[in-house]
Image: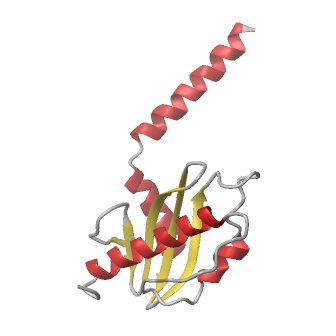
Amino acid sequence: MKRPLIGVVALLGVALCIDLFTPRSAMHRRLAEERLGEVVPIDMPGLPAFQAGERAMLFFDHDGIEGPIRGAVVIAGDRITDVLIRESREGLDHRALSKGWLKLFRGAAARPPVVVDAISGATVSSRAVVDAVNERLKQWRTAQGLDE
């Protein structure tokens, strides 16, 4: 009985070490390249952001009720093309932030304030995502010299 437990603990230890020593920026860059192709970093505060021509991907972390909400805003030109949630434990089934709701961001101007109706029953969680999107857009616009 002890051997399988030792094996599980060893695997968890290895996974934790890999997670601790893999730079977050490398993971973010890989995700941006999968979505946008070849990217260059954008110099702005907070989590990494990347650009490929007129398209950009701005990563965010924001506090939710059940823990961090991690995601990204994808922009093309002056419009939001997508909001992605990479990690969230919001809601009883951990699916409070549905893909259907996230589609409401598509086509919105990439200029704060972006206004999207909150999800009934997940108002705080959905507001957290809207706040994160607006915060990152503001930082991005400032970094691009679009807003002073």
In depth, the one of 17 and 75 nearer the eye is 75
Rendering coords of residue 143 (x, y %): 27, 77
Which image quarter is the C terminus in? bottom left
Compared to 143, does 78 lie above or below? below
In depth, the one of 80 and 124 nearer the eye is 124
What's the colour scheme? secondary structure
How many marks the image carries: the answer is 0
Which image quarter is the N terminus in? top right
Residue sitting at x 70%, y 8%: 2
Left or right, 128 with respect to 6, comes to: left
Q: Quadrant of residue 11?
A: top right
In depth, the one of 109 and 34 nearer the eye is 109
Compared to 96, does 67 lie above or below? above
Residue sitting at x 44%, y 76%: 134
Compared to 67, does 138 lie above or below? below
In depth, the one of 49 and 136 nearer the eye is 136
Rendering coords of residue 74 (x, y %): 50, 77
Left or right, 121 with respect to 138, comes to: right
Q: Quadrant of residue 56?
A: bottom left
Q: Extreme top residue here? A: 2
Left or right, 75 with respect to 4, comes to: left
Residue 23 appears in the picture as rendered: yes
Left or right, 139 with respect to 27, comes to: left
Residue sitting at x 63%, y 14%: 6
Residue sitting at x 53%, y 65%: 128
Q: Quadrant of residue 50?
A: bottom left
Residue 38 appears in the picture as rendered: no
Rendering coords of residue 40 (x, y %): 34, 72
